[in-house]
Amino acid sequence: MKTLAIVGLPNTGKSTFFNRITGASAKVGNWPGITVELYSARIILGAEAVEVVDLPGIYNLHGFSEDEKVARRFLEQTPLHLLAVIVNATQLDRQLGLALQAKELGIPMVLLVNMQDEARRLGIEIDRERLEAELDTPVVMMSAKHGAGLDDARRVLMERLHTARETRANPQVFERDDAIAARLDDLYNRTVTQPRNLSDGLTDRIDRVLLHPRFGLPLFFLAMLLVFEAVYTLGAPVQEGVAWLLGHAREMYLDEVTKHWGTAWRSFALDGAFDGAATVLSFVPIIVLFFVFMGILEDSGYLSRAAFLMDAFMSRLGLDGRAFVMQLMGFGCNVPALMGTRVMRSRGLRLLTMLMIPFSLCSARLQVFVFLTTAIFSPTVAPLVLFSLYVASFGAGFLTALLYRRGLRNTEPLLLELPPYRFPTGRQMLLRGWQETSHFLREAGPLIMLGVILVWFLTHYPFDAAPASAETLAGRIATVFAPVFQPIGIDSLLTVALLFGFVAKEVVLGALAVIYGVGQDNLASVVATRIDGIQAYSFMLFVLIYTPCLSTVAVLKQESRSWSFTALAIAWPLVLAWVVSFVFYRVATWIV
Amino acid sequence: MTLDQLEPGDFAFIIDVAAEPALRARIEAMGLRVGKEVKVIRRARAGGPLQVRVGLTDLIIRPVQARMIHVAATRGAPP
């Protein structure tokens, strides 16, 4: 087995190339001495079995941001047979610097000059043979996105791997990268000819509209609205389809199979294990669609523009414009929005964003709120109540960012490239959707299953009691916690509903129907007689803010890889929800 | 003067990058090196970031970091 590592600056098409040569076989894996998981794949190149590792994008070998340090540590500690350095053909004036530094490591190397189609369009001429001679390294021109030059790249990698010996990097190189500036200019001038006027006219023209001082922001919100609608309007029917299929499977097959099982086992199979699996699967369509559209935003270059437009506001919260995009996407579903924070490289910035996203009023909570507001408030007041919940949602998110921005400090300056506008390819986006989905199923899936089964147990044990009644564990917990929830107007029946809501917030409605012992159809009229407006609003504030749903918690863990952060992300919203509901309930009952 | 004092359309040469070494290395890797010419394309409203062009790269940079980059404005800059 030989080892090949791919390095390059961010936005050079490094991952596209990696996906091209490894197919969809990439897995996240652990490496000795490195805490972060890296994408790698085992492939056959010619007669060699090769482990290909995709390192995080780096600007230099020194390592400034956290994932740059990961790449550095990997290069320091792992003996390699070959290093493939990818550079963007249109930015050789600065990117060849990395090639010069990497060369000094002493590891056998190949230079892959990507995006040659763009360079050609701009009139940039690169003297490949000269570059090869100057660097004393094979150089391949290619376009990973469109597939041009890939065969050449494969052949050169194969040849080099065949003769390469396992080599450790020269440890002294990492600290001294200042000396290359002069050599970089020299190398560039000798190997690249660029036309005098180099700006990409089309991108400039589009930017003049999309980054317009007055219209830029409204256009940004319009674009967000369109993407949002596209993801969730297209996603909803697919989700319903999945739910319908699963419902049928349950009726046609599982009901039959479990017919003669004991009540407890049957309930476990149907309401515990099966519902757990169904919860996990219901996210798949949304995750695929989300990443297809995030792929469009990111690969087209618009996400960086969004950062430009929103930064003045978000930087005051210790965040940047991309955090705002994810917060907005969270209004559909928190789960993919959390996964989307991976575009941010600073860990502090990412965690702060991840702490804020669960406050976004997602479509599951919206179902509950629409139901309760129409059941309890008059048609003229109901829309205002709903609107105020949206305001509360943004408020809770921004407040959280303000309070935690010192603890979860963003250590990285906002220094983002604004790439030219590009058309993303369908292949790339689908591959990304597939990778993210399988990652979610493997990492978050088991945790979600476990949680659903736990809640099932709490609400069904002892098995001779009526589910969710006062005799079950859930009912007893509600009684114990009565002193906590009484002051905010939430009685023990509603407390049990909150417990159910932890599985998925839309379950609150079904739970209320079970708890009040009525069908979903009569629920509205029954609820209206049992709780008043103030209680209902306090309850809704609590449902909006309290502990994110189980799937969100599982993804918080998946993305942060930290139990203590996950605990914070569970506990802080609980505290905030209680305080907000308490203040509201006390003030409201005092006024009325 | 520093980069954040330039107006959209202005050209300038970078004469110093006054940041701690790791940040300086990052700024330089983005193409903002001593001796390079930079052009300010636009500024976001309300104290937001600047869009600058250096060589073949367009970047956004916050005023805080732009203040670390010392420049000499060039007049009659090339089109």
Image (spheres, coloured by chain):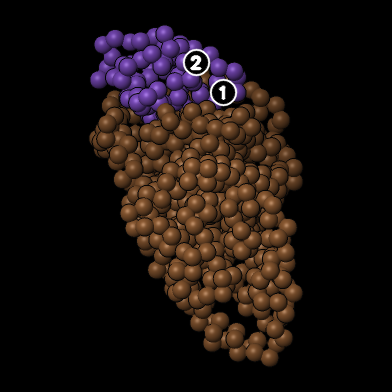
Chain colours: A brown, B purple
Nearer to us in this view, A151 or A27 = A27
Query: What residue lies at 59% left-to-right and 86% top-to-bottom?
Result: A255
* Chain that bears disc 1: B
SS class of the residue under badge 1? helix
SS class of the residue under badge 2? loop
Whether residue A300 appears in this view of the structure is: yes
Q: What amino acid is found at the position of numbered circle 2 in the picture?
A: Met
Q: Position of residue B53 (x, y in %)?
A: 37, 25
Nearer to us in this view, B5 or A543 = A543
Label 2 neighbour load within 10 Å: few <14, some 14-19, many 20+: some
- The residues bearing labels 2 and 1 have C-alpha atoms spaced at a distance of 10 Å
The answer to the question of whether label 2 and label 1 lie on touching residues, with beta carbons closer than 8 A, is yes
Residue B23 circle label: 1
Nearer to us in this view, A398 or A425 = A398
* Residue picked out by circle 2: B68
Label 1 neighbour load within 10 Å: few <14, some 14-19, many 20+: some
